[in-house]
């Protein structure tokens, strides 16, 4: 093997390794195998990864390097050609409920960018798309929809009292003066506008071109108007009445607003410099900026007039953040534009679409009710009354049964006696009316709800917060419906769907949805790269076999294997090369169907130019590797030697290998006779039968578990195994036997519980509650050791007790590390570094 093309380690004595020397080819797919405890993890993680990470930290800032003098270095003579290292372990260490599948894989980050760039705001009332209209955009849309027609470009002046967005016009005298200065001498007064007096309008324009085709008789003018809607000049000779055309205009562009055909728009009036401020209506009216023909050759003039209208709106109204303009044709069609994202019909203004708006980890986008958690903690009757078979006097209501609540229990018992509530009847058999009295209380007794409302006022005390948390359970937020985001974010759509809907999809469904979207040329220019990254990363997640997960699922609820595969897909999406990846048994917990998909992902990482070192026993992974290192021959002090190191093709015939004989097809070890015992479930005497289990993705399952047998539940990832066993079967049995009161999944019926006397749930969660917990303390062996040490003559002479030898209490534990054995250094921008305690070693 060429030393320059491989990672070379020599003199390695980490843990139980016996001064070994080994080479790992660069850009190889290397598997480290051997019996448990033979030194595989010591070589892969505590030597290779630890040294690769340590050398990488040396290239960082001086803040990070100041801790390197104390950082533990692997016990070895030397190592060469090691690239930067990344470890992907088979454990889920995420504890925060804010982390989701979407955030940990960065898919949601790309979704936020996509919605920021091309999210289409949709009016909640009129359901059409709203867009910011620059003068150029407004001109393009105007010509597109009103081609060949004539009309007016107007600037709205809003009524002081009722205006969208709280805008107010200037005082009438100031407004009229500014209009005269800027040369705006014409206004459009809508029919029905309120005027200061009956003789408000000083004069009217009599331009023949503007009145062509309109009869100038007060009778005709009155007929054109409804009597109820007659404006201030009803009965007078009209200068120009904008007629009504009940027509619908087709919209060619996706972001164009629909044309509004309005009846009796209003009348154009000319204002003279000699007029007083009383000529201006009290209600909304429009300043005429220009009268134009909407034609492509006049695009420059139309654009300038729209810009003028935007400027005039901001000048003549204060309280507006953006300009507005209105186009009205001579036949009554109306088209409105705004420089901000606001609906010109109902006045609804959209928030600025930034990535933070679509993030539940930002105060800008998080739901104000649940603060971005998606649920709120509410009183849980199942926790307050954990055993409904008990009576009130027996302590059915748990918070009143505690010693600290003795006074409240006395009040409760007295109230029940006065109200005729039987204290000896089980809670489950009490009438609903009596339950509600105890629960909600009345003027004579505060009840359970009143008791907790009082405690809410004392939440500044730590023990009160702990007490409250024991009797509350998370319930979906009633405002955001579990989406964690502000309701306004649901008004921005991509492909007709809000971001909350996309986050609730499974990865497989989202991949199909994104794949079905087609971007316009403009959208592709704005967000094309974000779109391509999103599709690429979703494909990696599909390939790694987690397509059944939803993006809004909490990361802490994932199994170790699922979390590891998410990390693998994330690394693939990053596209790193020349990196050392160290993996810990990635196939553990995987159904054999998914092995090939996982191996495909590992090969893709390898093809990018990375070096893979995988601690693994699976035959498929070993068969697809290019290099193998076997540790052994035994465990603990019997291991620590390199049994084989070389290409996979020579591994199966290697002499002295302990693993190879179990993998060869002609191995005599595969021909051992196994004693089997067949059991007919239907004929079995004792069994537990569940009917209609429908929790999560279970489809009304009927299943029978035979007793006195070893029963295995198998199936592909996400098929419902854990839902059936740990979330349905165990909570039912535990509640029946009064061991634990958990909220289980839905089912119809269960039979056979009378055959059971006990139940124990063993899962993969850590047994230790603190970092000081270890197997000796957990098994209570350390209690006997401490007692024995305290009984020694020298201990008695010095006055030592059993607590002196305890690592959990002051007086016995190290005062520097508080019994942890390590000091944890906060690295700010990186994972914390654990250093061996200098005081107690």
Image: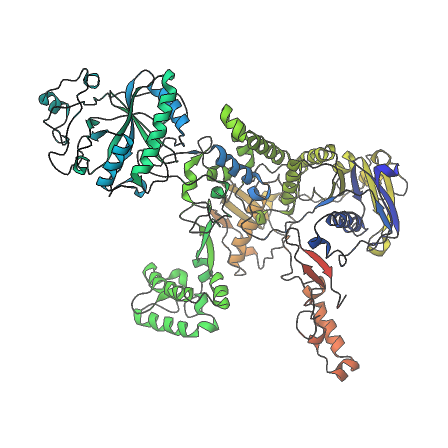
Report the residue that reaches farthest toward the bottom. 797
Would residue 66 be seen by someone viewing this image from the given angle?
Answer: yes
- For this orientation, the residue located farthest to the right is 655
Q: Is residue 487 above or below residue 411?
A: above
Q: Position of residue 234 (x, y in %)?
A: 12, 28
Asked whether residue 516 appears in the rendered view, the answer is no
Q: Quadrant of the N terminus?
A: top right
Q: At 41% across and 30% down in the image, what residue appears?
A: 134
Quadrant in the rendering for residue 767: bottom right
Query: How many numbered marks are there?
Result: 0
Q: Along the line of sight, which residue is nearer the eye, 548 or 570?
A: 570
Q: Is residue 783 above or below residue 59?
A: below
Q: Nearer the viewer, residue 605 or 592?
A: 605
Q: Is residue 210 left or right of residue 140?
A: left
Q: How is the image coloured?
A: rainbow
**Residue drawn at (35%, 27%) of the image:** 306
Image check: 168 left or right of 366?
Answer: left
Q: Quadrant of residue 425?
A: bottom left
- Where residue 622 appears, as percent x and y from the top left, is 78, 38
Above or below — where is 413 with respect to 576? below
- The foreground one among 508 and 708 is 508
Which quarter of the rendering shows the C terminus? bottom right
* Percent x, y of residue 290: 29, 24
Reply above or below: 205 against 347: above
Q: Estimate the x, y position of residue 136 in percent, counting from the top left.
A: 41, 26
């Amino acid at each position: 093997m060429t030393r320059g093309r491989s990672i070379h380690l020599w003199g390695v004595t980490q843990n139980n390794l016996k001064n070994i020397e080994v080479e790992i080819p660069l850009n190889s797919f290397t598997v480290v195998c051997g019996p448990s405890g033979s030194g595989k993890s010591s070589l892969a993680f505590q030597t290779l990864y630890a040294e690769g990470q340590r050398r990488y930290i040396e290239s960082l800032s001086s803040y990070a390097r100041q801790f390197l003098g104390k950082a533990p270095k692997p016990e070895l003579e030397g190592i060469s050609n090691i690239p930067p290292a990344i470890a992907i372990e088979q454990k889920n260490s995420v504890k925060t409920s804010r982390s989701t599948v979407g955030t940990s894989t960065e898919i949601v980050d790309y979704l936020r960018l996509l919605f920021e760039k091309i999210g289409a705001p949709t009016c909640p009332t009129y359901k059409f798309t709203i867009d910011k209209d620059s003068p150029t955009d407004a001109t393009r849309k105007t010509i597109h929809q009103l081609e060949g027609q004539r009309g007016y470009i107007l600037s709205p002046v809003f009524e002081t009292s009722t205006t969208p967005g709280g805008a107010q016009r200037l005082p009438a005298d100031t407004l009229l003066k500014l209009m005269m200065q800027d040369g705006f001498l014409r206004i459009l007064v809508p029919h029905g506008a309120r005027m200061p007096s009956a003789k408000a309008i000083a004069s009217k324009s009599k331009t023949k071109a503007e009145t062509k085709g309109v009869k100038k008789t007060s009778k005709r003018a009155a007929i054109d108007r409804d009597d109820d809607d007659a404006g201030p000049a009803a009965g007078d000779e009209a200068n120009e009445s904008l007629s009504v055309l009940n027509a619908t205009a087709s919209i060619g562009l996706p972001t164009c607003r629909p044309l509004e055909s309005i009846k009796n728009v209003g009348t154009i009036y000319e204002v003279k410099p000699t007029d007083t401020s009383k000529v201006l209506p009290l209600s909304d009216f429009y300043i005429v900026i220009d009268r134009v023909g909407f034609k492509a050759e006049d695009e420059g003039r139309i654009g300038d007039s729209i810009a003028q209208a935007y400027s005039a709106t901001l000048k003549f109204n204060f309280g507006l953040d953006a300009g507005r303009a209105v186009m009205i044709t001579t036949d009554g069609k109306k088209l409105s534009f705004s420089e901000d994202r606001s609906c010109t019909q109902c006045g609804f203004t959209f928030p600025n679409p930034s990535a933070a708006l679509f993030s539940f980890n930002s105060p800008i986008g998080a739901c104000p009710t649940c603060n971005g958690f998606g649920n709120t903690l509410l009183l849980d009757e199942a926790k307050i009354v954990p055993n409904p078979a008990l009576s009130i006097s027996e302590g059915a209501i748990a918070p009143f049964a505690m010693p600290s609540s003795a006074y409240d229990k006395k009040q409760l018992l007295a109230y029940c006696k006065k109200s005729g509530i039987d204290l000896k009847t089980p809670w489950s058999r009490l009438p609903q009316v009596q339950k509600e009295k105890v629960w909600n209380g009345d003027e004579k007794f505060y009840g359970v709800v009143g008791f907790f409302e009082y405690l809410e006022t004392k939440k500044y005390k730590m023990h009160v917060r702990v007490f409250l948390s024991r009797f509350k359970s998370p319930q979906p937020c009633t405002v955001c419906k579990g989406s964690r985001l502000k309701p306004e974010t649901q008004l921005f759509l991509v492909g007709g769907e809000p971001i909350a809907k996309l986050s609730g999809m499974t990865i497989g469904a989202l991949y199909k949805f994104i794949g079905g979207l087609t971007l316009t040329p403009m959208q592709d220019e704005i967000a094309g790269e974000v779109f391509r990254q999103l599709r690429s990363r979703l494909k990696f997640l599909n390939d790694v076999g987690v397509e059944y997960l939803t993006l809004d699922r909490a990361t802490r609820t994932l199994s170790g294997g699922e979390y590891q595969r998410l990390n693998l897909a994330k690394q693939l999406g990053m596209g790193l090369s020349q990196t050392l990846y160290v993996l810990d048994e990635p196939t553990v917990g995987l159904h054999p169907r998914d092995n090939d998909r996982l191996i495909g992902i590992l090969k893709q990482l390898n093809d990018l130019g990375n070096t893979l070192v995988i601690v693994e026993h699976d035959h498929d992974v070993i068969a697809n590797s290019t290099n193998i290192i076997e540790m052994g021959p035994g465990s603990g002090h019997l291991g620590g030697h390199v049994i084989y190191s070389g290409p996979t093709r020579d591994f199966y015939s290697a002499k002295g290998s302990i693993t190879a004989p179990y993998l060869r097809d002609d191995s005599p070890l595969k021909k051992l006779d196994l004693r089997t015992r067949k059991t007919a479930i239907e004929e079995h005497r004792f069994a537990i039968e569940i009917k209609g289990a429908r929790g999560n993705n279970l489809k009304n399952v009927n299943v029978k578990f035979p007793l006195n047998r070893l029963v295995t539940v198998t199936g592909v990832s996400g098929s419902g195994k854990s839902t059936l066993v740990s979330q349905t079967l165990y909570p039912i049995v535990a509640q029946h036997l009064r061991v634990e009161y958990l909220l289980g999944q839905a089912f119809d019926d269960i039979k056979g519980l009378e055959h059971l006397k006990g139940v124990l749930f063993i899962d993969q969660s850590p047994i230790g509650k603190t970092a000081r917990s270890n197997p000796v303390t957990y098994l209570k062996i350390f209690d006997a050791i401490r007692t024995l040490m305290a009984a020694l003559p020298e201990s008695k002479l010095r006055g030592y007790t059993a607590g002196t030898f305890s690592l959990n209490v002051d007086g016995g534990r190290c005062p520097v590390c508080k019994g942890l054995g390590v000091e944890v250094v906060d690295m700010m921008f990186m994972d914390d570094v654990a250093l061996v305690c200098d005081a107690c070693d």
